[in-house]
Image (cartoon, rainbow, N blue to C red):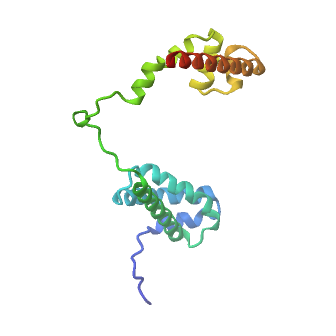
Amino acid sequence: MEEPLVLDTLAQEDIDIFDAAGTDPAALFGVAYRTFAGPVLGYLKARGVDDPEAVTQDVFLAFFPRINGLSGGLQGAKSLLFSIAHARMVDHYRRLERRPQLTPYDPQEDSRSTPSAEDHAVEFNGGAEALLAGLSDEHQEVLALRVVADLSIEQVAAIMGKSEGAIKQLQRRALHNLKAQTLSRNQANHE
């Protein structure tokens, strides 16, 4: 009898539990998770993945739908899990290669003599508060809830105690008034 080239590190107890689970995906997943979560995490840590715990969870989430087509018992599960883990690790390094290299900002090396465009825009317009100041309270409220808080029309209607149609009308009028005020301010500043 020929000996395998790779030593089987799986405990016979784990193999028996996996075989006893039959075709129940939840039981098979539980045994696979208990047996391989630590080794998969260790593999991802050793390969330098930024958040190995999260990637380990992603590996097992990708493994679960494939349990029904799994063959080879616990050894097959191990092969599949580590192939998924390897793919996630490769994806991690591909993302790193595409990420731009960031350079820290050092104010001592900043030789600009004019203010930034952002500073100019804030000074020129007076900020969002100044833009909203010319609107009625209801218009300010609807814009704050819809734009700043990013709430749906239904949510804003419930908060303000109005119908959805009324909220749509308020928002349309508020945006129209805001546009008119901004155009008149810009025209006055350019004259």
The answer to which quarter of the image holds residue 137 is: top right
Q: Residue furthest left?
A: 108
**Image quarter in which the N terminus is found:** bottom left
Where 116 sits versus 136, above or below?
below
Q: Position of residue 21 (x, y in %)?
A: 60, 62
Nearer to us in this view, 2 or 13: 2
> Does residue 40 appear left or right of residue 173 in this picture?
left
> Does residue 95 appear left or right of residue 110 in this picture?
right
Where 110 sits versus 75, above or below?
above
Q: Position of residue 143 (x, y in %)?
A: 62, 20
Q: Residue at x 51, y 17 (%)?
A: 191
Q: Residue at x 49, y 66 (%)?
A: 83
Nearer to us in this view, 22 or 88: 88
Q: Residue furthest front?
A: 191
| Count of marks placed on residues | 0
Where 109 sits versus 95, above or below?
above
Q: Residue at x 41, y 85 (%)?
A: 3
Q: Residue furthest bottom?
A: 1
Q: Residue at x 61, y 11 (%)?
A: 135
Q: Position of residue 12 (x, y in %)?
A: 46, 69
Q: Position of residue 160 (x, y in %)?
A: 68, 14
